[in-house]
Amino acid sequence: MTSNRWSDLDRPPLNAAALQRAIVTPGGLWTALDVVETTGSTNSDLAARAKAGAPEGAVLVAEEQTAGRGRLDRQWTAPSRSGLFFSVLLRPSEVPVRRWGWLPLLAGVATATALARAGGVDTGLKWPNDLLVTIDGEERKTGGILAERVGSQDGDGGGVVIGIGLNITLREDELPVPAAGSLALAGAKGTDRDPLLRAVLRSLAEWYAEWRAVGGDPDACRLRQVYAAGCATLGRPVRAELPGGETVTGTAVALDDDGRLVIATEGGEERPVGAGDVVHVRAA
C-alpha cells in the first residue's frame, strides 16, 4: 500500500518553509535547514556535505531514518514522523580541539532544557549522550546524541557533526526495546514537532555561543555545573564497558576537564572514562 505525507493524521509532516523562516536568520548560527522525507542517516549525509565544504550551521532533518546510528554503531529506528531525527554541523575553530569532547554534553544540556520548556517534560541526562524521561516511575531512554569529527583532526578546517534523535509520539507497541520511551508516554504537554525542533535548535545555538565565546571552558560558561545538575549518572553505581573488553565498576563521581566521566573504584582509584558503554547498576 502506498503511503503519503498525511497517511498518519496524528503525525503531520514538518513545515520546512516555516522552520527555515524561523531558524535561518541573518547573523544567526543556522545557515541552512533542509528537511528530507527519508534517508539512511542524517549524520552520514551531513558529514558528506561537510567534507564538500558546507558552512557551519547547516541543519539536516529527516522525517524517517532507515539506517540511523547511535553510539557504538547501534541502530536507531522509529516510524516515520514519530520523532525528531536531525544533524547539525559545527566548526568551532577557535576552541582547542581537546575541548570538543564537551560538544555532545552541550547538546544534551541544550536539548533537555528545550524539551522542559517547550514540551513540559523533565528530561534527564545519562552520560555521555542519552536523554531520559520517567514513565511509571522508571527511567527510559527517549533520545540520543552522536557526535562525529569531520575534516581536519587539528581543528583547522574541521568540524563536528552532531546528530540528535528524539522519540516524540512513539506508542508503547512501537518501542524498539522495553527500556525505550517517548515524550508522549512521559506525559509531555506538547508533542508538536515543529515548535520542539525550533526550541532545541535555539537552545543549542545559545549554549554553543556561550561555550565558544569562552574558548570552550566548561566552567566559565557553566556547562559542567548545569550538566552535572541534570545528570542521572553522577552519584550512581555504574559499570563502564570500555573498548577492548575492559570493564570498570564503581561510583560515578565527577566530570573531568575534557568531559570524561570519573569513576571511583572500590580500590580507591579514580578512573576517567572517555569512551565505552556506561550502565547504571542498582545498589546492592
Image: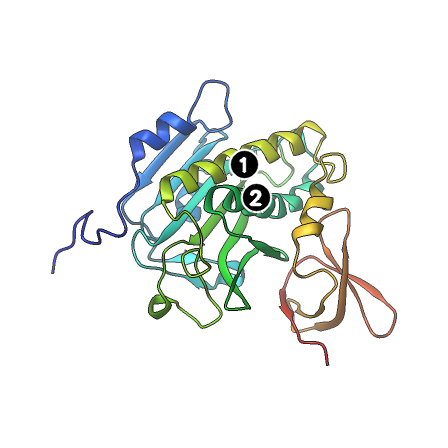
Question: In the image, 124: left or right of 163?
Answer: right
Q: Quadrant of the N terminus?
A: bottom left
Q: Nearer the viewer, residue 65 or 3?
A: 3
Q: Are marks 2 and 1 in contact (CB under 8 Å)?
A: yes
Residue lying furthest right in this view? 268
Residue at horizontal 30 percent and vertical 41 percent from the top: 14
Q: Secondary structure at mark 2?
A: helix
Question: In the image, 157: left or right of 236?
Answer: left
Which circle marks residue 113 in the picture?
2
Give how far across and how far down residue 209 sits, in percent.
Answer: 61, 29
Q: CA distance from mark 2 to mark 1?
A: 7 Å
Q: Nearer the viewer, residue 149 or 200?
A: 200
- Disc 2 marks a residue whose amino acid type is Thr
Q: Earlier in the sequence, mark 2 or mark 1?
A: 2
Give how far across and how far down residue 206 sits, in percent.
Answer: 58, 32
Residue at the disc numbered 1: 203
